[in-house]
């Protein structure tokens, strides 16, 4: 019996050593992916992860996983191809559309919004708010939720309707004096895209962003966001953006330069962590019910792309910050 326990102890020690050797033999990148996988599994086991996560580096997908349920009533499980709400991630598509038109010489970022929208009557907006202010959230405009709730007929997915509510709003802060996140400002950008291109906003985005990026399962509602799509489609979007299929590199550089007192460029959030910079956008929506939206898309300058889509309250479903923290960590830390 004593020999039996001795043999068992040796086996356990060998297994432990083998596991440690395997762990040490993994590259830094492989260790990060394994750490992310363990983090996701832990969250899923606690019923606090419902959605799809995709991690890639350069042009290779390293992790693509689905966890949890689409709907708590039917208990249908997420798959890798589940289209999910993306909320304010759509602002990237709007900003890129504006910059495409700027590249064609059809607009100038220094132009007043009223140069293209002749039904703006509020003199402050009409005479002061430029396209660059709308793109950088420095227009002083608000976010239209109060106006939408107060309207007789709620059409939150209709660009013309929302525009009618906000085009003559009073400003919340002086134009160009500081950052103030504004969904209303991006509604004006959508109407400018329509005025300049002669096409509906959704048609323009479908043709000039989704099609060029081969995004087959995505849709956009209004220019402030509200669309949906798959994590893989967002991966394709990131690849197209990095490879210059949507914009010249020089234009993307302009969009990812800080434009105010916070980390925001033109339609892109800008972050820095552990010496690694990144650009992209997050999005969230929750109306107090069981489900919500927590979306995250960022491209890091160390080559990684992080995509996380969840259909839960953003406070519960948002994991982008934790994923970023893992991917910017350095060896030995």
Image (cartoon, rainbow, N blue to C red):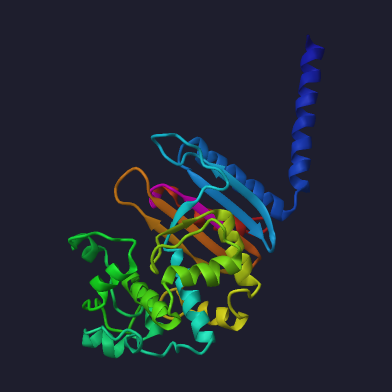
Let me know if residue 46 is in the magenta part. Answer: no
Residue drawn at x 76%, y 22% as measured from the top left: 9
Q: Position of residue 170 (x, y in %)?
A: 21, 78
Q: Position of residue 31 (x, y in %)?
A: 69, 50
Q: Position of residue 72 (x, y in %)?
A: 40, 37
Figure disc tally: 0
In which quadrant will I find the C terminus? Answer: bottom right
Residue drawn at x 56%, y 48% as measured from the top left: 81
User: Horizontal placement of 11 versus 222: left or right?
Assistant: right
Q: Quadrant of residue 125?
A: bottom left
Q: Position of residue 55 (x, y in %)?
A: 61, 55
Report the span colored magenta. 306-315
| Residue 272 in sight | no
72 or 7, nearer to the observer:
72
User: Horizontal placement of 326 versus 285: left or right?
Assistant: right
Residue drawn at x 79%, y 36% as measured from the top left: 18
| Residue 2 in sight | yes
293 or 23, nearer to the observer:
293
């Amino acid at each position: 019996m004593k020999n039996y326990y001795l043999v068992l102890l040796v086996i356990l020690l060998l297994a432990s050593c083998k596991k440690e050797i395997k762990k040490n033999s993994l590259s830094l990148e492989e260790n990060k992916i394994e750490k992310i996988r363990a983090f996701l599994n832990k969250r899923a086991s606690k019923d606090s992860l419902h959605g799809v996560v995709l991690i890639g580096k350069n042009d290779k997908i390293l992790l693509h996983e689905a966890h949890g349920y689409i709907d708590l009533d039917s208990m249908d499980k997420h798959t890798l191809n589940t289209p999910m709400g993306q909320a304010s991630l759509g602002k990237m598509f709007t900003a890129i559309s504006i910059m495409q038109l700027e590249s064609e010489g059809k607009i100038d970022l220094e132009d007043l919004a009223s140069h293209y929208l002749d039904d703006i009557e509020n003199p402050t907006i009409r005479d002061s708010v430029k396209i660059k202010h709308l793109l950088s959230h420095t227009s002083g405009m608000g976010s239209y939720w109060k106006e939408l709730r107060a309207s007789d007929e709620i059409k939150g997915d209709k660009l013309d309707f929302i525009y009618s509510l906000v085009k003559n709003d009073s400003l919340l802060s002086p134009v160009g004096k500081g950052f103030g996140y504004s969904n209303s400002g991006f509604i004006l950008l959508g109407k400018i895209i329509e005025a300049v291109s002669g096409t509906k906003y959704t048609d323009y985005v479908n043709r000039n962003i989704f099609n060029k990026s081969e995004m087959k399962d995505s849709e956009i509602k209004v220019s402030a966001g509200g669309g949906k799509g798959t994590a893989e489609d967002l991966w394709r979007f990131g690849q197209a953006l990095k490879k210059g299929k949507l914009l010249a590199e020089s234009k993307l550089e302009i969009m990812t330069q800080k434009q105010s007192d916070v980390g925001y460029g033109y339609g892109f959030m800008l972050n820095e962590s552990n010496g690694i910079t990144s650009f992209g956008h997050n999005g969230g929506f929750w109306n107090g019910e069981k489900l919500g939206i927590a979306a995250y898309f960022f491209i890091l300058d160390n080559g990684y792309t992080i995509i996380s889509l969840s259909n839960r309250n953003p406070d519960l479903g948002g994991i982008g910050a934790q994923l970023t923290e893992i991917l910017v960590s350095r060896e030995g830390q």
